Image: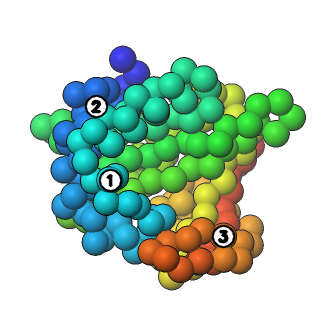
Amino acid sequence: MTRLQNGNDGRIFLRFFAAEDAEQLLALHMRNRDFFRQFISTRSDNFYTLESQQDIVVRDERARLAGTDYSFGIFLAEGGELVGNVALTGIIRGALRSCFIGYFLDREENGKGYATEAVGLAVDYAFDTLKLHRIEAGVMPHNIRSMRVLEKCGFRKEGIARKSVEIDGVWQDHQMLAILSDDR
C-alpha cells in the first residue's frame, strides 16, 4: 500500500483511502460539517451517511486506477487517526501534464503544519511519480491560511478566477496559484 511520509521526521503520512476508512471519513466530515461549509462546495444531507462515504472510497479507487484522480487520507503518524484529505484531481496527460490540488484538514488540527506537510508530499508525488508538469489550486482570497500553505510549498499566485466555485450557496472568487515541476 502506498504510504507517503517525510522520513522518520514526518508527523503525518498520506495513503490512499481503503474501505475500512469510511467510518473515520464520515466522523471527520460530521465533526467539521459547519467548519468545512465555509470552504467546500455545498453538500447534500445524503453526503453525511456511511453509505455515501463508502461509495466515495470506491469512486476514489476507480479514479486512481484510471489515472484521473489521486485522493489521499492525511493520517497522524502517531496513532494513525484520519485528520484530513489531499487530492490531485482532473489530471490531464499529453502536452499539458497538469492537475488541480485540493485539501481539507480537521478544524482541531489547523495551525500545526500538517496541511503544509501533506501538500508538500502530494506535490512530490505528482511531479516525481506521476511525472506531471503543473499543479493548480484555487483559494478564496480571504482564506489567507490556506494560501500560505500553498506558498510555503512553492505555489505562486497567478490571478483571480471570478465567481468560479459555489461555496455554501454563493459563487466565490478564487485566487489561482500554481507550481511547475521546474519550480522545485
Where does the image place residue 24, in percent across and percent down from the top left?
Answer: 20, 42
* Disc ID at residue 46: 1
Amino acid tagged 2: Asn
* Disc ID at residue 8: 2
Residue linked to disc 3: 164
> Residue at point 49% right, 44% down?
87
Q: Secondary structure at mark 3?
A: strand
Please say if the residues under marks 3 and 2 sit with CB atoms less than 8 Å apart: no
Please say if the residues under marks 2 and 1 sit with CB atoms less than 8 Å apart: no
Please say if the residues under marks 3 and 1 sit with CB atoms less than 8 Å apart: no
Left/right placement of residue 107 relative to residue 93 reads left
The N terminus sits in image quarter: top left
Residue reaching furthest left?
79
Q: Along the polypeptide, which appears first: circle 2 or circle 1?
A: 2
Where does the image place residue 52, in percent across and percent down from the top left?
Answer: 33, 42
Spatial CA span between label 3 and label 2: 39 Å
The C terminus sits in image quarter: top right
> Residue at point 25% right, 48% down?
49
Where does the image place residue 162, in percent across and percent down from the top left?
Answer: 71, 77
